[in-house]
Image (cartoon, grey):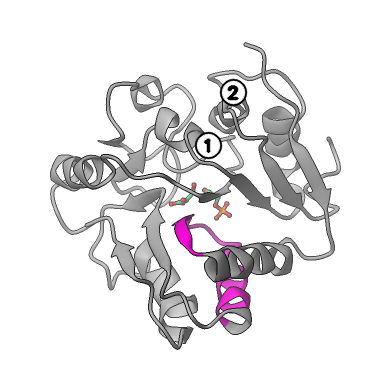
Amino acid sequence: MVASPPDVHVVDDPAIAIGELLAEQAKRGGSIVLTGGSSVDKAYEHAAKLTPDWGRVAVWWGDERCVPPDDDNSNYKLAKESLLDNLETEPGEVHRIKGELAPEDAARELDDALAGAELDFLLLGLGPDGHCASLFPGSPQLDVTDRRAVSGPPGLEPWVERVTMTMPTLQSAKRIVFIAGGASKADAVARAFGGEASHDVPASLTRLADATVEVYLDKEAAAKL
Ligand code: 6PG
């Protein structure tokens, strides 16, 4: 598969760089897709400080863990505490994935809600196994092309069911932006953004999109690129 080369930025602190990009997009308005993971809360806090008015933004999540919204594993909770609760003007739309529902029902709701939606800015983290959103290497969910969202089992911790946008949905975003930091991500970064696109490394498949994939890394994560 012929994948476009990504636009790689090696920066001191990817969270600060991503916070700035989110803040700029929030000023412009449009739809912003958030991610979970360990590296984004600082980016969300920074974005809220820079642009406290998200009134013109529709917020989505690329994936969710199937837990209630007040559970510590909830991607919604992470974004609520680091971003939404720190805003002066809340987003015009908040499309929370309902992790408390049966996974198939939450996925169907997300699939329906996405009908006709355009995604302006998609933020993704990168798993050490090369996954993005909740599309894990070798999982059948990775091959779904006739739905905008699906449910499926986890490929990594936390071991709870997931709901995720499908690869064609991720690829449809006008801007696709990855954040990754730390030496534990260096192998995955090299496989996702250095080589060809492959189903073994789900994040690499985003490089088949029309948009040029933008990647924000620290030195450690970029070490093997
Ligand atoms: C999730 C995320 C997931 C995450 C990566 C990276 O629900 O876990 O949406 O795709 O972005 O796993 O997460 P870490 O930064 O914690 O490794």
Residue 150 drawn above or below residue 196: below
Closest to the observer: 31 or 203? Answer: 31
View extreme (bottom): residue: 88
Residue 60 image-quadrant placement: bottom left
Q: Residues within 10 Å of mark 1 (few under 14, many from 20)?
A: many
Q: Is residue 34 magenta?
A: yes
Query: Where is residue 200 shown, x and y percent of the image?
Result: 56, 21
User: Which amino acid lies under the numbered mark 1 shown in the image of this protein?
Assistant: His
Q: Which mark is residue 131?
A: 1
Q: Secondary structure at mark 1?
A: loop
* Figure disc tally: 2
Asked if residue 208 can be seen in this view, the reply is yes
Q: Which residues are magenta?
A: 29-48
Residue bearing mark 2? 208
User: Which amino acid lies under the numbered mark 2 shown in the image of this protein?
Assistant: Leu
Query: Where is residue 39 shown, x and y percent of the image?
Result: 61, 62
Query: Where is residue 7 shown, x and y percent of the image?
Result: 77, 39
Q: Residues within 10 Å of mark 2 (few under 14, many from 20)?
A: some
